[in-house]
Amino acid sequence: MRVLIVEDEVDLAAMLAEGLRAEGMVCEVAHDGARALEMTAVAEYDVLLLDRNLPNLSGDAVCRALNTAGYPARILMLTAAGALADLVDGLGQGADDYLAKPFSYLELIARLRALGRRSLAGTSATVLSRHGVNLDTVRRVAERDGRPLKLTPKELGVLELLLAADGAPVHTEQLRDSLWDAALDPATTAVRVTVHSLRRKLGEPPLITNDPGYGYRL
């Protein structure tokens, strides 16, 4: 799941990004509304974590602009105000959900995951299966032939993309763009190392193949 954090408090934005990345989410950060609109113009995100009280261009204005443009991402609006009137007003700007500061980190994660599932409209199945490998995309757990797999968030992400492809190849660039931040050096071996680790944890007989020029397939 790709998340754009739009938060002008630099330390808070960095802390949120670090935490969400540890949960397996791909996170990028914008510190003002104008930058957020620039980033959404060239990239697709599943969820925006949008602070309402931004300098220059407010979160409300960003929300209205994205809704007018038909941008498909779900929006979770953050604000220091928690009154019912603020909740109603925030949702009236086009936000999908609303969370008042200070908030529970566990609640934030749960709400982001719920919005992420809603943004993937049309995928009614929550369990992906192929060749004895099952992945519960809601609980984020996987198994092979009934054997639980202890996978990292990145390995789970790679497995989900391979399963969703249903035997079609998934190019390295697609894995990188879907699961890693834009700041990742394209020359890095992070994708290859993750796939290698996932292949090892899946066990024998090997399931992941590499088609040169096309990508990985399960």
Image (tube, rainbow, N blue to C red):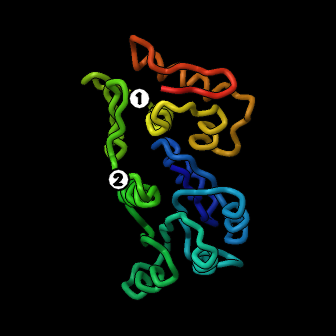
Q: Amino acid at mark 2?
A: Ser
Q: Nearer the viewer, residue 193 or 58?
A: 193
Which numbered disc flags the more N-terminal residue, 1 or 2? 2
Q: Quadrant of residue 55?
A: bottom right
Binning the other alpha carbons within 10 Å of mark 1 as few (below 14), some (14 to 19) or many (20 upward) gives some
| Mark 1 and mark 2: Cα distance apart in space | 24 Å
Q: Nearer the viewer, residue 112 or 55?
A: 112
Residue 82 visible to an observer of this rendering: yes
Q: Nearer the viewer, residue 189 or 208?
A: 208
Vertical order, 96 against 43 (above or below): below
- Nearest to the eye among marks 1 and 2: give it: 2
Vertical order, 54 against 150 (above or below): below
Point out which mark residue 124 bears.
2
In what element is the residue under mark 2?
loop
Q: Amino acid at mark 1?
A: Leu
Q: Which residue carries the number 1 mark?
A: 151
Residue at (40, 20) in percent of width and height:
202
Q: Position of residue 76 (x, y in %)?
A: 48, 67
Binning the other alpha carbons within 10 Å of mark 2 as few (below 14), some (14 to 19) or many (20 upward) gives few
Q: Quadrant of residue 8?
A: bottom right
> How many marks can you see?
2
In the shown orientation, is residue 21 left or right of residue 132? right
Residue at (48, 81) in percent of width and height:
90
In the shown orientation, is residue 150 left or right of residue 20? left
